[in-house]
Image (cartoon, rainbow, N blue to C red):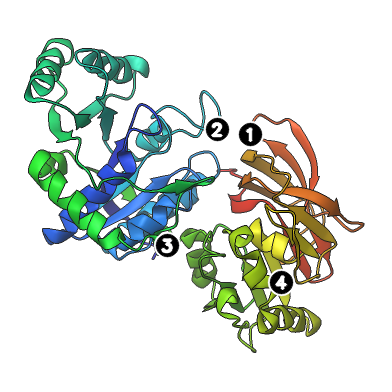
Amino acid sequence: MSGEKTVNGLIIAAPSSGSGKTVVTLGILANLKAQGVRVASMKSGPDYIDPAFHARATGQPCFNADSWAMRPSTLMAAAATAGENADLVVCEGVMGLFDGASATEGSTADIAGRTGWPVILVVDSRAQGASAAALVKGFDTFRESLGIAGVIFNRVGSARHQRVIREAMAYAVPHIPVLGMIPMEPGLELPSRHLGLIQAAEHEGLEALMAHAGNVIGRHVDMAALQALANGWAASGAVKPLQPLGQHIAVARDEAFAFAYPMVLQGWRNQGAEISFFSPLDDEVPAADADAVFLPGGYPELHAYRLSSADRFLAGIRAAAARGAVVYGECGGYMVLGRGMQDADGTTHPMAGLLPLGTSFERRKLSLGYRRLVQIAETPLGAVHTRFRGHEFHYATVTNEGPGIHLFEAQDADGAKLGRMGLVNQNVFGSFIHLIDREPKD
């Protein structure tokens, strides 16, 4: 797709994480789809878990929207692609509305500024009454160029609680409509683990939860008024964030390797690459004619024994590398390309042994944040000195790394030097970084 399209969109944001915006977003998506609206979604920031929930709700891929890590042209193309077969695109925010890579960059508010899509604020009203309206007023006036288009109050208590909030809103911000008040109902919680929510594929009751959330939204939110607030963005372009690894890229996909950005995969397709999938947990091997293999991140630590026992998979990865295929791993995939992975109990499980790397979950340490990257070894991703932006989020520690050639020189979002990251061994390479796009220039 390359032609310009007016993409109608809304942004579901919140004052902070934990406000319930993911479940509210899922309920809105489910309700719209049940009404027959062609709805698609996006997710602000570098998250890869929420988009999988969105995709289950809409039946369409969910692309990320990241004003820090994406070039403006990539962000526009992602929105254009998301809106290609949709009447409305619902974009879920990340953290609080104004939280991002720094105090001034990479927030959901920046996405609103770029797209012109109105912000619907989801406010957790537990433990506050009239103060909830003061909070809304603060968010409405914090950035002069960005106001709040509507509010949904979540986890509201009694009828009196509702009345107090409505009266306070009418006094403090009469120009902002209250679109709904969602009561505290059971069955609207999503379970989580150390990286956030559990994966959509692991949630056995997800369809029922989304249907329930859609019904709750339908009863307590004015959906017609919400849809009427949507605004259009004239977006265009085809996503092409990263160069393809090859002409036929075999991508690992299962509960251990689920963190591949849909935008990256679509970008490879847009540049002529064929994508096929295989499941390491089912002991499957990459397609025999694949000239590249991609092992994305995920939760390999939860399946370390099973992966180390997947003889066909490990032999298939080694065979692909031996015949000259490109083999690339990110985060969990990078760990699986190493010699061994130590689980939380201290047991070391042998892995593919294609990179001189050992990792451990017994000695956990959080590594989290956006990354600026300069490639220091030539790979199919680009020549030496090619610049990227990406994100790092894991608890694994490195027990041994190298000797060998490193892949990147890294900095954090503020420009602080983080040293060299990742490894390259001929046609096998990887790092803990989830690459999002090339360095923004335009």
Badge nearest the viewer, 2 or 3: 3
Q: Secondary structure at mark 4?
A: strand
Q: Position of residue 343 (x, y in %)?
A: 69, 56
Residue type (three-letter) at the residue carrying disc 3: Glu
Screen quadrant of the N terminus = bottom left
Residue type (three-letter) at the residue carrying disc 4: Val
Marks 1 and 2, how far apart at CA: 6 Å
Residue type (three-letter) at the residue carrying disc 1: Ala
Q: Position of residue 18 (x, y in %)?
A: 38, 34
Q: Which mark is residue 101?
A: 2
Crowd class of label 2 (few under 14; some 14 to 19; many from 20; radius 10 Å): many
- As drawn, is 29 to the left or to the right of 164? right
Q: Mark 3 or mark 1, which is nearer the start of the sequence?
A: 3
Residue where numbered disc 1 is placed: 413
Residue where numbered disc 4 is placed: 327
Which residue, as the protein is rendered here, is positioned at the far bottom? 288
